[in-house]
Amino acid sequence: MLSKKVLDAINEQINKELFSAYLYLSMAAWAEAHNLPGFAHWMKAQFKEETAHALKFFDFVADRGGTVILKAIDQPEVEFKSATELFEKTLAHEKYVTSLIHNLYALAVKENDYPTQVLLQWYISEQVEEEKNATYIVDTLKALGEKGQALVMMDHELGKRG
Ligand code: OFO
């Protein structure tokens, strides 16, 4: 059985994961509108991943006999200055999510909730990947620049994401 504190914190995190999904879908919409189908593809894949993150928490709450309470999802940003800014904001957002996951883990430790600690270890590793991927793309975009062929090449690369 989950303690009320842990249950409330996981419910909050489900909201944050769904917001992440919404943010990346908004970035996909921006990319589509700016004729960057590869960027849009990458962001849509990210949208699906975040939805899966939310569902993983959802199923865990159910497995532990808790009830998921869904809250309103904030409106994400819709305007971005450039393709590079899209990924700078992705990286900043992932660093924020990492801090939330770490806070949640600290709470699970404080509450002696071992199953939640085990679950969160998956998210902790996942955040390392998320930050690594976004950092690589930001650095590459900065190195190549956003003009002509470089942007087309990057769009092609991002469109290969499985
Ligand atoms: Fe982008 O990360 Fe979820 O947790």
Image (tube, grey):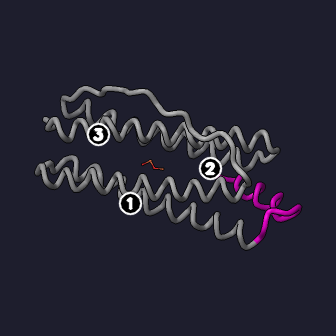
The reply to whether residue 159 is in sight is no
- Which of disc 1 and disc 2 is earlier in sequence? 1
Q: Residue at x 61, y 59 (%)?
A: 88
x and y percentages locating residue 94 in the rendered image: 48, 55
* 81 sits left or right of 66 in the view: right
Q: Position of residue 103 (x, y in %)?
A: 28, 54
Per the rendering, the mark at residue 89 is none
Q: Are marks 3 and 2 in contact (CB under 8 Å)?
A: no
The residue indicated by pointer 3 is 10
Q: Give the class, few, some or many, for how many residues have Cα within 10 Å of label 2's Cα (few <14, many ≥20).
A: few
Q: Looking at the image, which residue sits at the far bottom?
A: 143
Q: Is residue 32 above or below residue 121?
A: above
Query: Which disc number belongs to residue 162?
Result: 2
Q: Which residues are magenta?
A: 144-162
Could you say whether the residue bearing mark 3 is in a helix, strand or loop?
A: helix
Residue 155 is one of the magenta-drawn residues: yes
Q: Earlier in the sequence, mark 1 or mark 3?
A: 3
Q: Residue at x 64, y 65 (%)?
A: 138
Residue 131, position as x, y percentages in the image: 50, 62
Measured along the vertical axis of the image, is residue 128 above or below residue 10?
below
Query: Which residue corresponds to mark 1?
Result: 125
On screen, residue 40 versus residue 73, left or right, reads right
Check disc 2 and report its element: helix, strand or loop.
loop
Q: Quadrant of residue 82?
A: bottom right
